[in-house]
Amino acid sequence: MSLPSLLSQHIVRRPQRIALLQHIAEQGSITRAAKSAGLSYKAAWDAIDEMNNLAQKPLVERSVGGKGGGGARLSREGERVLRLYQRLQTLQAQVLEAAEDASDLDLLGRLMLRTSARNQLHGTVAGIEAQGRNDLITLILAEGLTLHAQITHDSTQRLDLQTGTEVVALIKAGWLELLPLDQAPTPGYNHLTGTLEQILDADDGPSEVRISLANGQTLCALAEPMYLRTKGLLPGQPVQVQFSPSNVLIGTPL
């Protein structure tokens, strides 16, 4: 099963998110589209980020701070996926009719991949370097961005990884560290540069920070408000993101 199939599974099992795409196409506003789809504004942003990161190309193009909380429209790829979903609905109905027992659908649901990791990035294996009992996996993300994951050799074999394998890189928000541009990153760490898009303050605890990468994918990090102020990190400014290869998990479709 290819990674586009994983995106299709994600869409079929989360119809609210396809509804969100439909409402964005109709209304051109994240706020109005979220309300119509029965989602909070934050949940809508999360859904858009996740779909954009899993797709080959971003499905939604947006601008922060527009009328109604931010303008948005479907990209050409988003329009194509919306048409695809309409065809998948027909196929889904056929699958439901073909199920021999109601428990069959419960079993399939348990087998689908779901994860608590906020960052799920589509990538392709470009290289595998043996390092003792571990392997350093080089991944190519959209637009040629490079990412490294360190996993055990057993995991490489169990996942049947090889050059060209499409995977999802999973990174928890708390594993990302934000750095200003003038600070040198830690040697051996993954290092990406993007734009600090938004800071969502929490009543108690770290703030949620969204970073827009040049390839259209989005990262979510956690950072203490005092740290952000001390480093002078503000929305709209360029920022570095670093994280250890050992903190990158790799997932493949079943």
Image: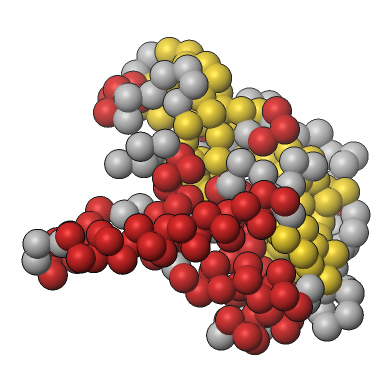
Name the residue nearer the viewer: 186 or 121: 121
One can see residue 35 in this view = yes
Count of numbered tags = 0
**Residue drawn where x is 68% and y is 41% of the image:** 242
Q: Is residue 101 above or below residue 214?
A: below
Is 94 on the left or on the right of 247, as rendered?
A: left
- Classify residue 155 by image quadrant: top left
Identity of the residue drawn at 27% across and 61% down: 94
Residue 199 position within the rendered picture, expressed as x and y whole percent measured from the top left: 76, 68
Q: Is residue 119 left or right of residue 130?
A: right
Q: Is residue 112 left or right of residue 148?
A: left
Would you place residue 83 above or below residue 140 in this image? below
Residue in the picture at 31% in, 54% down: 112
Q: Position of residue 5 (x, y in %)?
A: 42, 45
Tell me: 196 left or right of 245: right
Q: How is the image coloured?
A: secondary structure
Quarter that holds the C terminus: top left
**Nearer to us in this view, 116 or 68:** 68
The image quadrant where one finds the N terminus is top left
Identify the residue at the far left of this view. Answer: 101
Residue 206 in the image, given as x and y percentages of width and height: 65, 69
Residue 124 percent across, percent down from the top left = 53, 29
Residue 179 shows in the view: no
| Displayed quadrant of residue 71 | bottom right
Q: Going 78% across and 73% down the picture, which residue do you hit?
A: 28
Looking at this view, is 76 or 135 the one in front?
76
Q: Is residue 52 above or below residue 185?
A: below
Q: Is residue 143 above or below residue 28?
A: above
